[in-house]
Image: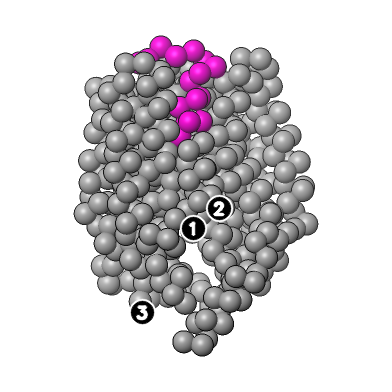
Amino acid sequence: MNDTLSMKASAEAAPIVTRERAAVALLFFLNGMVMGAWAPKIPFFSQALGLTESMLGIMLFVFGVGSLVMMPVAGMQIARLGSSRVVQITTLLYIPTIVLLTLVDSIWTGVIAIFLFGGLTGAMDVAMNANAVEVERQMRRSIMSSCHAFWSLGGLFGAATGGALIATLGVLGHVLLLAAICVVLFLVARPMILADAPHPSDEPARARLPLTPLPWLIGLIALFCMVPEGTVLDWSALYLRNELNASTEFSGFAFAAFSLTMATCRFAGDFVRDRFGGVKTLRVCGVLATLGLLIAGRSDSVTLALIGFAIAGIGISNMVPIAFSAAGNIPGLAPGVGLSVVTTMGYSGILFAPSLIGFVAEHTTLSTVYTAIPALLLVVLALSHLARYADRVTET
């Protein structure tokens, strides 16, 4: 009991902001900004290669394959080299890929470019999340929700400015400016990144899959929470442009509205979860996400759709951080093992589901897709009692 009180007192006395926390926040912001800028660029990428919706779906599937191929590679390199070195390497390799996507002039160069883009997105994502965990351990304070909030802020900035910059500077001018900003952010963050030690002992544990169903069920929660997020990222611009007749400048504002509310609520996420508990927070978030997606899917105007996407952002904001926290605190299971299952399943939702939606949308409409997606969140609500494991973070 005294040990627990001592640990809590140490956490309360720890500084809220450190150089290392600022560095990892900048990395999350950088990654989110590039992904946000990708949203309004997708219609131009599709147009440049003459892609149908199903062909674009295949391209997005390649993006997902690239990410899932590179994620375990990044994990093994983190165990061997430490997250600091891996996040620096992957960031430097990641930045040029958004430019490469603009220079493609054939289907095959498009496949290569989007595979690299997806692969390095996933590799950087694993590395920066691993570095955030190390910063949490150093600070003895939860920062994961705020890190994901900075990712959402980056997504908001990239999506909100993308359409206007493309209209002003052109597609190539937009990505060159974006890459330059990313390089500056990386140079600012680099000297402050926490230099962690390698963890070679984690590698054998990562290779073994758990036999208990609990991490897989929590992984299902992460999967069904991230499918809507991926759907908004990859298809909302096309939905506004093609079905609601939005202009190029406004096409990126769906993901921007989603990212704005998501970022705001993620900054408050740790406090809300500590106040009300993981189960109640997940259930309220699930209801709001369902409501928002239904409004967006059934709207007949851009304004109403934006309101729906904003409400969905509020709901989805803290669902994935809760699932990740629960995965790292499963009794009798090493944190790395639980997280490896849940993150892989979760990111499968954000990476692969949008590609399958391309095939569905070609035979129906994106309005129908956004109306049907909330059915997945009903499964999340049914499994929401498992979020109680996330509360163990505040008990240790």
**Foreground mark, 2 or 3?**
2
Question: Residue 270: which disc?
Answer: 1
Amino acid type indicated by mark 1: Asp
Residue 336 visible in the snapshot: yes
Mark 1 in CB contact with mark 3 (< 8 angstroms): no
Q: Which residue is mark 2?
A: 146
Tell me the residue at 32%/59% (across/down).
279
Amino acid type indicated by mark 3: Gly
Mark 3 residue crowding within 10 angstroms, few (<14) / some (14–19) / many (20+): few
Tell me the residue at 36%/72% (across/down).
330
Distance between mark 2 and mark 3 Cα atoms = 28 Å
Residue 194 location, x and y as percent? 69, 63
Q: Earlier in the sequence, mark 2 or mark 1?
A: 2
331 and 40: which one is in front?
331
**How many numbered marks are there?**
3
Residue 55 location, x and y as percent? 38, 26
Residue 26 location, x and y as percent? 66, 48
Tell me the residue at 35%/76% (across/down).
331
Q: Earlier in the sequence, mark 2 or mark 3?
A: 2
Residue 80 visible in the snapshot: no
Magenta-colored span: 242-258
In the image, farthest residue toward the front: 275
Distance between mark 2 and mark 1 Cα atoms = 8 Å
Mark 2 in CB contact with mark 1 (< 8 angstroms): yes
State which quadrant residue 101 falls in: top right
